[in-house]
Image: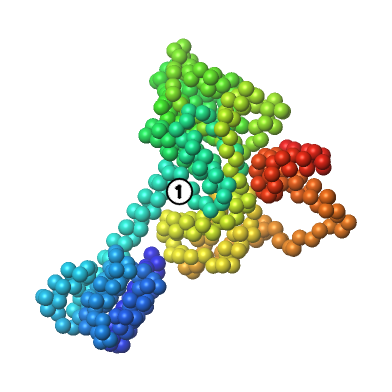
Amino acid sequence: MKPNWRILITDDEDVMCESLAAWLREDGYTVDTAASGKAAVELAREHDYAIYFVDLKMPGGMDGIEAMMEIRRIHPTASVIIITAYATVDTAITAMKEGAQEYIVKPCNPQEISMVVERIINVKNLQRENAILRQRLKRHYQYRDIITKNAKMHDILQLTRDIASLRSTVLIHGESGTGKELVARAIHFSGDRAAKPFVTVSCAALAENLLESELFGYEKGAFTGAGAQTRGKFEIADGGTIFLDEIGDIPPKLQADLLRVLQERCFYRLGGTDEVRVDVRVIAATNKDLSDEVRQQHFREDLYYRLNVIEILIPPLRDRREDIPLLANHLIERIAHEVNKQITDISEGALAVLLDYDWPGNVRELENALERAIVTCRGRVLMEEDFAFLSNTIKARSAWTIPQDMSLQDLERQAIAVTLDRTQGNIKEAAGVLGIDRSTLYEKIRRYDIARN
């Protein structure tokens, strides 16, 4: 990952400066040069270099020690290597005392320079890797690591804090890939259950009999292959939180069993006769309209109301496009490190492609698209052509024109109908999008006889 690191060489001798720069460029590093201490300080204000080579004796009123001290005031963790033709014990002690990481005597040995730089860069790579790993862990456990500047998402984050220590069940609605589990984790790890287990179950991933044993466990001999008593996810989550993902896909029989757990806080293991009592907070998530599932008798109405005590609706990524640049920059740094690619930035053209795309798979699809682009990218900056695979699905965005003979009332009716459809009939959210009061929206719905989902 050498090209991710920039090096600054400061020496008033042009020959020394350029030869040292040439050595390091041959090693694959990006190198800038400065002819004086003042010039080095100015460059340090613009960039945080991985390593600063600074000549001890320089004209212009600022010697190497002074330049190093000023650089370290700007970047306290800067790695500075002092180079000098006048090596003495006193100068070496002074340089190291003021924060120099290395002290090299001219004429410089290219192999020695390469070894010193490689050693420092290896340490910095480990520090960066540790920082990324810490961020990854925090991303799983803290609501603060949900990256957003969207007002609705900030309201959701505030709600997660408000309800974090409650026992009430939560139902999270959102399209696939919007971050429903991340919000569920934010609720759990922000409350007084944070030290207890957070257990995830995908209700869509298992067949009915397997899901039953997964949720409630089983006794020895309950079925072929049940060689020992096994705890289910509800028992494992005792004292903490169980996250039931895609709850809309849970089979009818298990809906009844789940309702009993929510009402009585107890259940039986598969094949068992002893009642098991647990203290578990339930957070469920779905990408379906459960109220419609209830109307079609695919989902129990009593279970729906038990789950829907606190409702959270996560907006899709296409409705919070202002988050795309933030998410892209965050994901590029992490993915580039994971796949060991030297990607440092994304061009304006490439970012425009991401902003133009509707992201039916939301943040998960964005992450996958960035990984594909990073893996195939041949440079250090993601360009528009690196996202050519999206071009076949990007909708042409031409200027919208009002259809002929459409009245202002027709236009208003269409705007309200489309907004209600996008918000799945949520009056509060639709009113916010349209910029009107809920009472005004109700009046217009009645006036235009608009059907709500």
Is residue 4 depicted above or below 207 in this figure?
Answer: below
Name which residue lies at 22% across and 68% down. 99
| Quarter placement of the C terminus | top right
Residue at horizontal 57%, vertical 50%?
A: 151
In this picture, is 92 found above or below 193? below
Going by the picture, which residue comes out furthest to the top?
Answer: 273
Q: Seen in the image, is 326 located left or right of residue 32?
A: right
The structure residue drawn at horizontal position 35% and vertical position 70%, both measured from the top left corner, is 49
Secondary structure type for disc 1: helix
Where on the picture, by quarter, is residue 442?
top right
Q: Nearer the viewer, residue 275 or 411?
A: 411
Question: According to the image, label 1 marks what residue?
Answer: 145
Horizontal and vertical percent for residue 50?
A: 33, 68
Residue 430 falls in which quadrant of the image?
Answer: top right
Picture coordinates of residue 53 (x, y %)? 28, 76
Quadrant of the image occupied by residue 52: bottom left
Residue 252 visible, this angle? no
> Is 185 displayed left or right of 83 in the figure?
right
- Residue 308 % position (x, y): 59, 30
- In percent of the image, x 38 and y 64: which residue is there? 1
The type of residue carrying mark 1 is Asp
